[in-house]
Image (spheres, grey):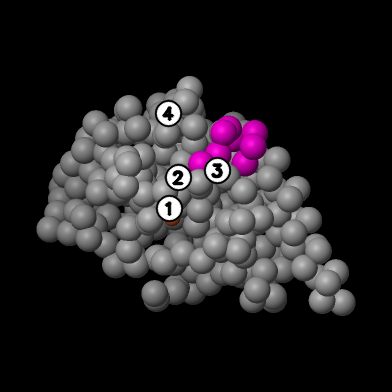
Amino acid sequence: MKTYKLKQNLTQVYKNYTNEDLTVWKLLFKRQFALLKTLAAPEYLQALEKIGFTANKIPDFSETNTILSKITGWKLEVVEGIISEPDFFELLSQKRFPATTWLRKLNELDYLPEPDMFHDVFGHVPLLIEPKFSTFFEEFGKLGVKYKCDPQTVQMLGRIYWFTIEFGLIKSKNELKIYGAGILSSHGESKYSVGNQPAHLPFDAKIIMNTPFENDKIQDKYFVIDSFDQLYESMQLIKRTIFEKFKVQV
Ligand SMILES: [Fe+2]
């Protein structure tokens, strides 16, 4: 997958959005929301409302940043696409979330070679105001900064990211719900992820760190947290696992 250089001072040029962009946003929002109102984690749905995203308006980053900064201190950082891992960790460690500002075209609603704004913003941004999730994400970035030169640790952190932030499920009142952005923004994967086909495994950070994933096909397994408290508390085990790895190597 192509990675882009992190450029300073990129901004969202709101007036450049076209009618097609608005139509795409509207279609995707309505289609996903119809599914997610019963499938998404309640924390995500509350956050979506609180952050003010609606079908009728493409999010304006300056407004979103005002809300984010008041609640948990995050800020959207405009990027052209996927950035390098060290840059990604660096931004997260400073509570800056990299987000694209472009939207897919009408004729590619379900196929995307790389993440667009619907994925980055609709999928990722609402939960940035959930306190435990927010702290977990920030700590994750800090760990990444610390160990960015060790490929094995970066790989382990990549797996944590994949099975939580992107493809995480949560048990809420005994039902499986979605909180991972990769699922929240995917029409095809939303229903599938909580259905009978894939495996649903209890969340275990240590197991996840040793579980490879494939990023070019629909997932065959998902890890399920009990709560965002559990996710937040798992950071201790993640740190310990990395620390022990280095201790053994020394
Ligand atoms: Fe993502």
Residue 150 in sight here: yes
Residue 190 image position (x, y, % from top left): 31, 43
3 or 1: tag closer to the N-terminus? 3
Residue 57 image position (x, y, % from top left): 28, 37
Residue matched to label 1: 221
Residue type at numbered disc 1: Lys
Residue matched to label 3: 202
Q: Which residue occupies the foreground of this view, 104 or 229?
A: 229
Residue 31 image position (x, y, % from top left): 21, 38
Residue matched to label 2: 200
Q: Element under label 1?
A: strand
Mark 2 burial class by Cα count in 10 Å: few <14, some 14-19, many 20+? some
Mark 4 burial class by Cα count in 10 Å: few <14, some 14-19, many 20+? few
Residue 94 image position (x, y, % from top left): 65, 53
Highlighted magenta segment, given as a residue range: 224-231
Residue 185 in sight here: no
Tags 1 and 2 touching, CB below 8 Å: yes
Residue matched to label 4: 175
With respect to residue 27, does 94 lie above or below?
A: below
